[in-house]
Image (cartoon, rainbow, N blue to C red):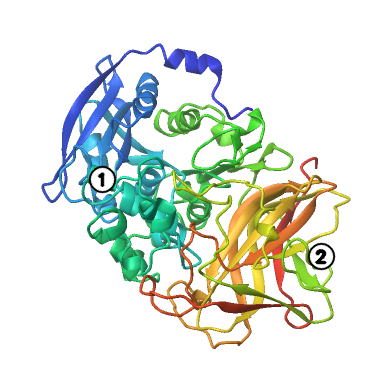
Amino acid sequence: MPWCVGADLNAQRVSNEIRIERHKPVPMRDGTILYADVYMPAKPGKYPTIISRTPYGQQRDGSHEIMTKFARAGYAVVFQDVRGRYESDGKWEPFRDEAKDGFDTIEWAAKQPFSNGKVATQGGSYLGHNQWQAASQAPPHLVAAFPSLASTNIYANWLTMGGAFRLSFNYGWGVVRMPNRIMLPQYWHTADFTPEELKYENILMHLPLKDGDLKSANSPVQHYRDWIRHESYDEYWKAISDEERFDKVKVPTYSSGGWFDIFVMGTINGYVGMRNKGGTPESRKEARLIIGPWGHGPSKSFGGVDFTDAAYISQTDMELRFFDYHLKGIKNGLEKEKPVKLFYMGANQWREEDDWPIPGTKFTPYYLSADGPANSVRGAGVLSQLKPAGAGTDTYRYDPQSPVPTTGGNNCCGTPTSSGPRDQRPLEQREDVLVYTSDFLEKPIAIAGPVKMKLHAATDGPDTDWMIKLVDVHPNGFAMPISEGILRAKFREGLDKMKLLTPDQVYEYEIELTGTANVFKPGHRIRVDITSSNFPQFDRNPNTGEPLGSSTKTRVARQTIHHGGPRASQIILPVVRDLND
């Protein structure tokens, strides 16, 4: 494709010799010393500089190859351990120091003999988040940023989704993998040697959540406990939210992510935030977005689905092209391309777009209805563009002691749940999953953009969860999830507003699902699955209304979904022009 790096350019890059300066001290404003390795071309000189800051260790597998590639392309690369991790001094507290430490590192690097004063940032996941943090401080020498697979609001698109706690990720990352101390070997968990009660899937069933760290780390993990204690989007989270400070970011940014990545909502919000609120005309104009059919990094197949060779794009090649344009002034055609590049699943094609949402999108409601119980795929649930005149209801029983197991979706990073477009048919056999399916399609329907569910529902307790999945049903029955969303009911008025329910009262909930791009092909069907759990990706709502992490018991909830008539529950799909147009 025209926006991929050519083979000749790659061949030129790998011929350059490099040198590495190890363990370079980088002083922070409070006197703490962080340490970095610096990769650079062997020939002495001043080079445009790339900074990557990691909590995972400079010697992590694969990192050396990436930094070497940048150096061979004519860049000096500062690869640094963040505060309190590996070789760097200070106390590790996730997220809290990345803004000021990132600023200090950028300004330090710009003044070094190896730098020409033009600095960009690079990296994915946590490394992408801390790029946003640093950029929000407007460092004078920062020229561009390429945050990949990155959250832009740690509360809204890392810690939770719709207020529901991402248990397997937060526990797996925050307690097991990234505690504020080194765990003793006897508390590591492997399938072959761990006692049954200490296996990961059983630890996650522990109540109350607030002391679950003792089950694995054998001592309190303070940041995990702080996350649970701050269960709403309060000042604790707003202080580190990039989405509160897009107007402070003054440089071009390129947001990269995957449709099945846990941080895809942050990827999209990063682009939209900069396009609309960036701190300079250039930063707004030069904001870019690319999303492929990936999980936590580019691939050609994911979750058991082969999206063809067209799906894979080299992350470092994308980054180098962006850096060449902005740091070296190379006219490589980037300026001629549209700002948004999306991979359309189903058709397995890339297409460039003018913006997100795509101009001309028809946000089209598909209504729920049923002429009998919609429980499971055996039920009578229907999805249609025709608004049903008659009112109806469907009910199911949500028991937190028997939650719907996580199968596919937007998971991440070695958690014990499967991720990606996994077949939903095993879940759709359950009576606590409502299934609404369209007729077989006669013509293709292409969607790309944000997806929203308007759900009229009631529960017989003070709180519960509503879990929604949008599914592409193939002719052979394979039920491929392409978008998902969850809402903890007490956050129905906003993530910073907790308000318990009146039992059995019907509320209208707006549930944001992950953005997507998909072509429903002829012979396929469109499906919506509704339930109240997705465990262990999300914690089990105990239906008691108690503060997050404090419940020691659960209660069974009776859930009622209303559809048709004045309470027309519907999913709103972003329908766009056919890919052949």
Q: Residue at x 47, y 82 (%)?
A: 499
Q: Is residue 139 above or below residue 203?
A: above
Note whether residue 279 is visible. no
Name which quarter of the figure residue 44 lies in.
top left
Between marks 2 and 1 in the image, the one whose residue lies nearer the viewer: 1
Percent of width and height locating residue 106: 27, 41
For this rendering, which residue is in front, 80 or 309?
309
For this rendering, which residue is in front, 319 or 428?
428
Percent of width and height locating residue 503: 56, 87
Percent of width and height locating residue 396: 66, 74
The amino acid marked with disc number 2 is Ser
Q: Residue at x 17, y 31 (%)?
A: 24
The amino acid marked with disc number 1 is Gln
Residue to which mark 2 is pinned = 384
Q: Residue at x 36, y 69 (%)?
A: 208
Name which quarter of the figure residue 567 lies in.
bottom right
For this rendering, which residue is in front, 295 or 559?
559
Q: Residue furthest right?
A: 442
Q: Quadrant of the C terminus?
A: top right
Q: Which element type, helix, strand or loop, lies under badge 1?
A: helix
Q: Quadrant of the N terminus?
A: top right
Q: Is residue 183 left or right of residue 543?
A: left
Q: Earlier in the sequence, mark 2 or mark 1?
A: 1
Residue to which mark 1 is pinned = 186
Q: Is residue 323 left or right of residue 106?
A: right
Note whether residue 70 is visible. yes
Measure the C-alpha gap from mark 2 to mark 1: 54 Å
